[in-house]
């Protein structure tokens, strides 16, 4: 028998049972110990198959030591023999360092977990407070911005209403002036008719009375003045109509903008009054990703400002046009009355210049008709020349097309090929030149036709001006309208 710690194998009186394979393997080296899993206390009802209850129980076997003779082994009588252990059982135990380190590790892990939890609670509380303040501040800023937006809309609504009232008044005033201009224009038809009938009646005179005198000049001048007045009136009437259209367009834009702003004012006012306790609030998932806006604050304000500026510009133009129309009515009335008096004074003069002008126009008309005839013959000859160039062009192009079917190396760019290409180009250029000349001739013909039409019109006017009767004309000229009617007031 050896003492504990002897290098020899220990001898037991009763041999211990061999541990089962279900027991966990435990290293005898302290350095290999790792506390890899945190400690979670298990409920008493848990029975783990790898943790038998008998593993950690204290051995109850009390080995019976054999009696040794004191004389045989040199032991004194009554002395206690030392307890002997198996070395295998010692190698399966944890060391005190392992036990200490395990306790320290569990304590450190517990302390770290508690510190992390405490830090998380503090950070969470601060985060909640910060986010609450941030949410409240953001909502206040949004409400403030909505209030500013409502005020901006209200400001532009007032501006639009004021400008809209001004535009409506200006449009009504311009409409009244336009009606006066229409009445004045209608009143010029009677004097013009009188002048034209005077010219027609003087055409009936014969022999020595068929001369162009000062009466004819004054009558034509009167007709021209009346027509000039009519053209100016019509031109300003068209301007007035166009200006009314522009005024109504600007008015429509302002009314539409005002209606949009009223709707936006109602919506933004409603949004400004919405709070966390308001009824009707709900989730609208994804609405923040929808960007249906088509303007920014600058472009939004500029849009209304442009509408107002446009309306102001149109009002200025409308006022200027009204002033011009008023001046026009006064000027045209004076011009027609002055010319009416001049015609009445020189009504007995001859019309010799009218007859001479008529003969000259007839000569020019004959020459024009002759030149039209020659031009038409020239056009026909040009068209014939163009038709004669079509067959040669077809022949040359057909030859070129047939030669494209030559096989392989026979597709040679020889002198025949080059000459055919040049022939096609020359024919194309010739046809193009003739067509250009044809267009020039046709343009000349159109100019001659227009000149003929003008001459025929002038001859008709001059012919009608020769038929006038002094008594009939003087009788008709007594119905010339008064100044108030020419100004459009009656």
Image (spheres, grey):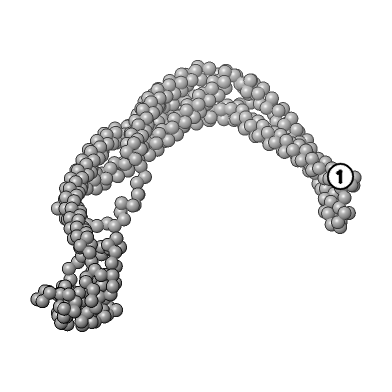
Locate the C terminus and report the quarter of the image it occupies: top left
Residue that extends furthest to the right in the rendered view of this protein = 415
- Residue 426 placed where, x, y %? 83, 41
When the figure is inspected, residue 49 is found, relative to residue 400, above or below; the finding is below
Q: Name the residue nearer the viewer: 251 or 192.
A: 251
Whether residue 284 is visible, yes or no, is yes
Q: Residue farthest to the left?
A: 78
Q: Residue 207 occupies which quadrant of the picture?
A: top right
> Which is more toward the observer, 432 or 194?
432
> For this rendering, which residue is in front, 384 or 283?
283
Q: Nearer the viewer, residue 175 or 56?
A: 56
267 lies left or right of 295: left
Quarter where residue 57 is shown: bottom left
Q: Label 1: state its secondary structure.
A: helix
Specify whether 388 is left or right of 28: right
Residue on which the image places disc 1: 418
Quadrant showing the N terminus: bottom left
Residue 147 seen in the current view: no
Residue at image coords 24%, 48%: 267
- Where's residue 403, x and y in %? 86, 53
Q: What residue sits 86% from the left and 52% below the top?
A: 411
Taking 382 as reference, is 255 left or right? Answer: left
Image coordinates for residue 416, horizontal then vertical, percent: 90, 47
């Amino acid at each position: 028998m050896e003492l504990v710690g002897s290098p020899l194998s220990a001898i037991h009186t009763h041999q211990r049972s061999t541990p089962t394979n279900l027991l966990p393997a435990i290293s005898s080296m302290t350095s290999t110990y790792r506390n890899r899993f945190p400690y979670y206390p298990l409920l008493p009802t848990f029975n783990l198959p790898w943790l038998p209850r008998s593993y950690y129980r204290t051995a109850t076997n009390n080995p019976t030591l054999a009696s040794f003779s004191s004389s045989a082994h040199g032991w004194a009588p009554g002395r206690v023999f030392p307890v002997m252990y198996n070395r295998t059982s010692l190698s399966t135990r944890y060391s005190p360092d392992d036990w200490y380190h395990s306790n320290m590790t569990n304590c450190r892990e517990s302390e770290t977990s508690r510190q992390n939890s405490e830090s998380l609670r503090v950070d969470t509380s601060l985060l909640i407070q910060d986010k609450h303040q941030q949410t409240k501040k953001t909502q206040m800023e949004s409400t403030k911005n909505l209030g500013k937006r409502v005020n901006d809309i209200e400001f532009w609504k007032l501006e639009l209403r004021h400008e809209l009232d001004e535009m409506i008044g200006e449009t009504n005033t311009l409409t009244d002036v336009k009606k006066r201009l229409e009445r004045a224009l209608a009143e010029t038809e009677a004097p013009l008719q009188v002048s034209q009938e005077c010219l027609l009646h003087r055409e009936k005179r014969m022999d020595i009375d068929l001369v162009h005198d000062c009466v004819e000049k004054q009558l034509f001048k009167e007709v021209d003045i009346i027509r000039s007045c009519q053209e100016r009136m019509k031109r300003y009437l068209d301007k007035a109509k166009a200006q009314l259209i522009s005024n109504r367009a600007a008015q429509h834009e302002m009314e539409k903008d005002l209606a949009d702003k009223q709707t936006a004012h109602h919506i933004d006012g409603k949004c400004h009054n919405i709070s966390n306790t308001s009824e009707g609030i709900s989730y609208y998932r994804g609405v923040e990703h929808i960007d249906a806006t088509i303007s920014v604050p600058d472009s939004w304000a500029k849009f209304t400002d442009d509408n107002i500026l446009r309306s102001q510009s149109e009002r200025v133009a409308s006022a200027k046009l009204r002033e011009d129309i008023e001046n026009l009515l006064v000027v045209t009335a004076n011009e027609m009355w002055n010319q009416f008096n001049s015609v009445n004074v020189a009504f007995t003069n001859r019309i010799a210049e009218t007859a001479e002008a008529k003969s000259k126009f007839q000569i020019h008309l004959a020459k024009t008709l002759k030149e039209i005839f020659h031009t038409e013959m020239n056009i026909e000859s040009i068209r014939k020349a163009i038709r004669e160039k079509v067959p040669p062009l077809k022949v040359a192009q057909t030859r070129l097309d047939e030669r494209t079917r030559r096989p392989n190396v026979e597709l040679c760019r020889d002198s025949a090929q080059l000459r055919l290409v040049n022939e096609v180009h020359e024919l194309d250029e010739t046809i193009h030149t003739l067509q250009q000349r044809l267009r020039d001739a046709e343009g000349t013909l159109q100019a001659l036709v227009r000149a003929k039409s003008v001459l025929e019109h002038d001859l008709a006017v001059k012919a009608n001006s020769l038929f006038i009767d002094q008594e009939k004309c003087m009788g008709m000229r007594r119905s010339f309208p008064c100044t108030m009617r020419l100004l459009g007031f009656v």
